[in-house]
Every structure is written in C-alpha cells, then in structure tokens.
Image (cartoon, helix red, strand yellow):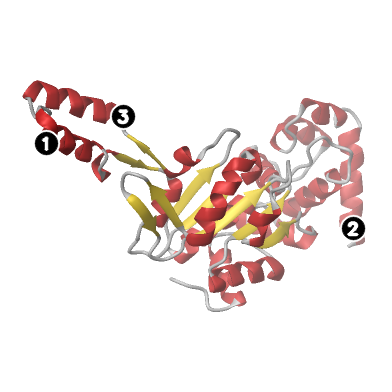
Amino acid sequence: MQQAQSIDQVQQVLSSQGYVCGRALATVVFLSLKLGRPLFLEGEAGTGKTEIAKALAAGLGRRLIRLQCYEGLDAASAVYEWNFAAQMVAIRTAEVSGEAAGSAGRVALQNELFSADYLIERPLLQAMRPDERGAPVLLIDELDRTDEPFEAFLLEALSDFQVTIPELGTIRAPEPPIVVLTSNRTREVHDALKRRCLYHWVDYPDFSREVEILNARAPEASQQLSREIVAFVQALRTEDLFKKPGVAETIDWANCLLALDVIALSPEVIADTLGAILKYQDDIARLQGSEAKRILDQARASLDAA
C-alpha cells in the first residue's frame, strides 16, 4: 500500500503490523500523511512512539531510515561525512602514479576526492534520496537527547526538505519523507520545531487497549494470563516508582512468562521476573516480600470488579 486514504485505513495498516492504536493517534498519523507534515510524538518511554514509525514503514511498504539522537549529535553526523580513509588512499595512489603532478592534475584529483564516490550518506541525506518504493519513513528518535543547535539545524531540514553540501550543492528531496520525531520529554523541545509538526502525546493505554496490544504482540498468552499481566502492570503504574513500566515492558514480561510456561501469576513468579518490567534496583527492592502479593491481589480485585 502506498498511501492510507482514511483514518480507518491507517488503523488497519498499523494493526496489520501488530500495532494497536486509538482513533486520536490514527487521526494525527492520517493528517501527517495527508498534509505531508512531520509527526511529533511525545510521551513516557516505552509507550510505543518508536514502534509506530516501524509499523508505518512496514505497512506502507516504505524504507525505514532511523536517526538515533544523542547528546553531541551534530549536522555532519546526521547528514553526511567524507570518507577520509579512502581519500587518503586515493591521494597516495595519485602521488605514486604521478597523476597529481601539475595544476590540472591537482584540480582533477580534488574534484574526484569530493565527488559522490567518497561521500558517506547519513540518515538525513539518505531520506532526501528518491526511492522507487515511495518516500521513506524518517524516524528521528529521542530528539530530547540532542542539543539545541541540532534542533535549529532540523528547522531548515524539515522546512524545505533539503540539505546543502558545500562541495556538491543543495540536494532537495523529490518527495518529502514521512517524518516521525519522538521525545521522552527529558527536556522541552523548542516551540519553533514543534510548530512545524503535528503533535500528539502518547499516553499509557487503558486496560482494554493494553490487553488488545498484548493479544497482538504475544498471541500465545491465554486471555486470563494476558488480563492478569495487564492488570498487574497497570496497578504497578500507580505505585511510587522511579521508572514506571511501559507497554514495551508489558510485552517483554509476557514473553518471559511464556518462555517459563507460566499459566497464572503468583508472588513467587513475579519476584523471579521483575527484571523484565522494572529497570531500577530501588524499584525492584520495593516489590520484594509482601508488596508483590498486595499489588497482585489489587489487580485481581480490579478484574473481578470489571
């Protein structure tokens, strides 16, 4: 499929890849595709922001290009680099063969060294290239990890969908890529960048939605086990934890329990597998002893009341 024609079709495309989303998220994705605007997804870690870009690329049959952000990321690392090692080999070869002798030889060598043959394309430049499958999906992941100067650079790239290489000129995308930016909100992203995007806050799903997600991503789990897992994780999110478990942890935990042939939760099983849902020792220590049983009882009570 090259393009989704409706909100329902967006949900179908994502669902076909095991990604279950509500209508509000499907609507903003549809508008992003329809209007050609970047999609900015913000929310807690593990709520499925990155996965939506993967599902979108797979569902539409597009190439996925990922730019993983980190502190110190600069435009050169995100756009292109020259292959200095290969350039040095070419220079030595030209010197030995005498091809670099004279001004004409030096000009020819310089033109060769700064040609496409020695260019290493990084994600942003790759996303500007034509693709026979259609415009790629460009995932700019965890933007909040970068510095503000890189955000300023992105303003130009996302406004005009073009990048400039001094030695080669300006390269413009023949068709704007489908851009998905994510942020875990460890810091605020600048308003100027947000204005160029369609924004959506990705929250933890409610109980029924999370069960639906688990059914899609861990279909081997029984319905009873899936409901217990989700009820326990949702109860866990109400506790005072340093890092609350996301949907990704719910799926990981279910797969761990399936690998252990667990058919029902118990305090002992929970204690043995807490590392799949909690990632900090202080949080794990809080659930040792009777705490796991208390939360499990609370989760089961909520299921009985439903």
- For marks 2 and 3, the one nearer the N-term is 3
Q: How far across and how far down the image is residue 196, in percent?
A: 62, 61
Mark-to-mark CA distance, 2 and 3? 66 Å
95 left or right, relative to 24: left
Write the residue at 61% across / 67% down: 29
248 left or right, relative to 91: right
Write the residue at 84% across / 26% down: 285
**Which of the numbered marks, if any, corresponds to residue 84?**
3
Is residue 220 in view?
no
Amino acid type of the residue that numbered disc 1 sits on in the rendered structure: Ala
Assign a secondary structure to mark 2. Answer: helix
Taking 120 as reference, is 37 above or below it? Answer: below
- For marks 1 and 3, the one nearer the N-term is 3
Quadrant containing the N terminus is: bottom left
Mark-to-mark CA distance, 2 and 1? 85 Å
Q: Which of the 4 image quarters holds residue 256? A: top right
**Label 1 belongs to which residue?**
104
Mark-to-mark CA distance, 1 and 3? 22 Å
**Label 2 belongs to which residue?**
304
171 left or right, relative to 101: right
217 left or right, relative to 110: right
Q: How far across and how far down the image is residue 273, in percent?
A: 72, 33
Assign a secondary structure to mark 1. Answer: helix
Quadrant containing the C terminus is: bottom right
Taking 283 as reference, is 151 above or below it? Answer: below
